[in-house]
Image (cartoon, rainbow, N blue to C red):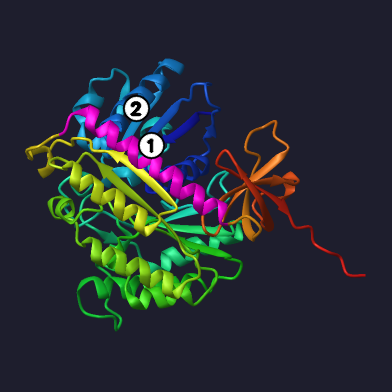
């Protein structure tokens, strides 16, 4: 029996796609190899959001070939689109699949590698998110925005939506297989609705797309057994008042929102070609805070964008402090060939970029520490993920606000949502005590 191994770098979309391939390979009768065993078929779903992601992708391919020099190595994903020539130089790569060719991987393996051209090919979807307790479901692909720093719209193509009924069916299967939480993901989920029939929603623009997303959320939250539904990331200007009202209407909508900021300076935002300014960002965050009790807001910030002055950066620092993000994902600006930003004047020395990165990380530590400390004494719902490491007697999991908590408990609680009282925070780690159910006699 042939063995396989699948791996990915980058975003939740890549994680979902690689899980669909894993299920497909098992359906074809392949056996999954353990790490280090050297699989017969190896698939890597690559990332190209930074230069480091590209070099890591190449290293993963070389490692697979070292483990089994006769392996059929298949490479796909954004790096396979952006730097195909560099992958082609790696001796031993069997085939490269573009982003729009991923669904052709299973038929290729069945026909070309297994000699079974008539094999039944399953749908490119998932019924279980591997060993994870939270399941990711891709609702759209592609992006029609063209931010000056980003190569992803070129690599992923225009935005296109999945059929809502297919999504509802897939989420239902995931819930029936034991998942309590589902995270909706995509390259730009605010574009969900593009290409779908109107069905009475507004005729054009963000309101039309927002209405389609809201309609999908209403259908999903009615699925029996689904206890937590979350948006992976959404652009702040796409959070309409109607969407805020919907998210506030049902406690199953997780009150954690990842809203990419990129810069807290209007001058930089204009040069990035973002579709909002700091005033709009602040207004939409306040709208969420007015409707939803203590929402957790995380964000992405790029430091060292070409032409960013010290004053610009200080504006970003002040804005992040004012919003009070629970988590800052800080990215040093990385030149991506083919983007407008790559041709801009004013590229900054790496020393300056690194200094700003460390300053923002220090702010993140301060803001995150204050946020975590605010939960001490509260009882929170934790989706149990399992042991933090094999020999640990502790359990770890995430709350609906994306707070990670460590506490004592048996392994059988994995995948369940349990109440935990937060007792304290030590070294950035949140510790709690599980509430034992009281039996009434």
Quarter of the image holding residue 228?
bottom right
150 or 330: which is nearer to us? 330
Q: Residue furthest right?
A: 441
Mark 1 is surrounded, within 10 Å at the Cα level, by few (under 14), some (14 to 19) or many (20 or more) other residues, namely: many
Where disc 2 sits, the SS reads helix
Q: Does the image show residue 276?
A: yes
- What residue does disc 2 label? 56
- What residue does disc 1 label? 9
Question: Gap between marks 1 and 2, in whole Å?
Answer: 8 Å
Question: In the image, what residue occupies the spot 33% across and 29% down?
Answer: 57
Where disc 1 sits, the SS reads loop
For this view, does 75 lie left or right of residue 344?
Answer: right
Discs 1, 2 touching: Cβ within 8 Å = yes
| Residue 79 position (above or below residue 73) | below
Secondary structure mostly seen in magenta is helix
Instruction: State the image coordinates of residue 161 (x, y, percent, origin top left).
Output: 30, 62
Magenta span: 348-374
Q: Which mark is residue 132?
A: none
Instruction: State the image coordinates of residue 375 (x, y, percent, origin top left).
Output: 59, 56
Question: In the image, what residue occupies the spot 61% across and 67% down?
Answer: 225
Question: In the image, what residue occupies the spot 50% across and 70% down?
Answer: 293
| Residue 105 position (above or below residue 42) | below
Quarter of the image holding residue 380?
bottom right
For this view, does 407 lie left or right of residue 23?
Answer: right
Which quadrant is the C terminus positioned in? bottom right
Instruction: State the image coordinates of residue 294 (x, y, percent, origin top left).
Output: 49, 66
Mark sitting earlier along the chain (1/2): 1
| Residue 117 position (above or below residue 441) | above
């Amino acid at each position: 029996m042939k063995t396989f191994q699948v791996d990915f770098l980058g975003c939740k979309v890549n994680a979902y796609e690689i899980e669909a391939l894993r299920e497909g390979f098992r359906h074809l009768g392949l056996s999954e190899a353990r790490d280090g065993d050297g699989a017969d078929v190896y698939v890597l779903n690559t990332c190209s959001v930074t230069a480091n992601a590209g070099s890591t992708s190449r290293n993963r391919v070389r490692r697979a070939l070292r483990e089994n020099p006769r392996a059929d190595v298949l490479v796909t994903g954004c790096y396979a689109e952006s730097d195909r020539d560099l992958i082609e130089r790696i001796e031993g790569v069997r085939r490269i699949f573009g982003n729009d060719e991923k669904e052709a991987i299973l038929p290729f393996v069945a026909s070309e590698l297994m000699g079974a051209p008539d094999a039944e090919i399953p749908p490119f979807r998932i019924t279980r998110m591997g060993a994870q307790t939270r399941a990711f479901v891709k609702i759209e692909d592609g992006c029609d925005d063209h931010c000056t720093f980003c190569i992803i719209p070129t690599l992923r193509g225009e935005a296109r939506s999945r059929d809502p009924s297919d999504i509802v069916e897939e989420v239902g299967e995931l819930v029936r297989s034991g998942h309590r939480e589902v995270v909706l993901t995509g390259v730009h989920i605010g574009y969900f609705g593009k290409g779908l029939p109107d069905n009475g929603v507004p005729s054009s623009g963000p309101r039309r797309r927002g209405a389609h997303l809201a309609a999908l959320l209403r259908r999903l939250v009615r699925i029996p057994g689904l206890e937590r539904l979350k948006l992976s990331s959404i652009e702040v200007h796409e959070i309409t008042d109607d969407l805020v009202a919907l998210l506030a209407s049902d406690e199953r909508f997780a009150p954690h929102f990842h809203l990419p900021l990129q810069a807290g300076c209007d001058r930089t935002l204009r040069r990035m070609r973002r579709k909002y300014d700091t005033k709009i960002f602040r207004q939409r965050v306040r709208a969420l805070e007015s409707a939803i009790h203590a929402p957790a807001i995380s964000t992405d910030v790029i430091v060292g964008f070409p032409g960013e002055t010290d004053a610009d950066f200080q504006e970003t620092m002040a804005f992040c402090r004012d919003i009070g993000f629970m988590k800052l994902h800080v990215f040093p600006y990385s030149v991506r060939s083919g983007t407008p930003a790559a041709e801009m004047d004013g590229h900054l020395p790496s020393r300056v970029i690194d200094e700003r990165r460390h300053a923002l990380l220090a702010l993140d530590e301060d803001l995150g520490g204050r946020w975590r400390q605010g939960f001490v004494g509260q009882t929170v719902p934790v989706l149990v993920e399992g042991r933090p490491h094999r020999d640990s007697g502790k359990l770890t999991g995430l709350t609906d606000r994306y707070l990670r908590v460590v506490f004592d408990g048996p392994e059988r609680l994995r995948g369940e949502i349990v109440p935990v009282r937060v007792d304290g925070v030590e070294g950035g780690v949140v510790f709690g005590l599980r509430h034992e159910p009281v039996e009434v006699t």
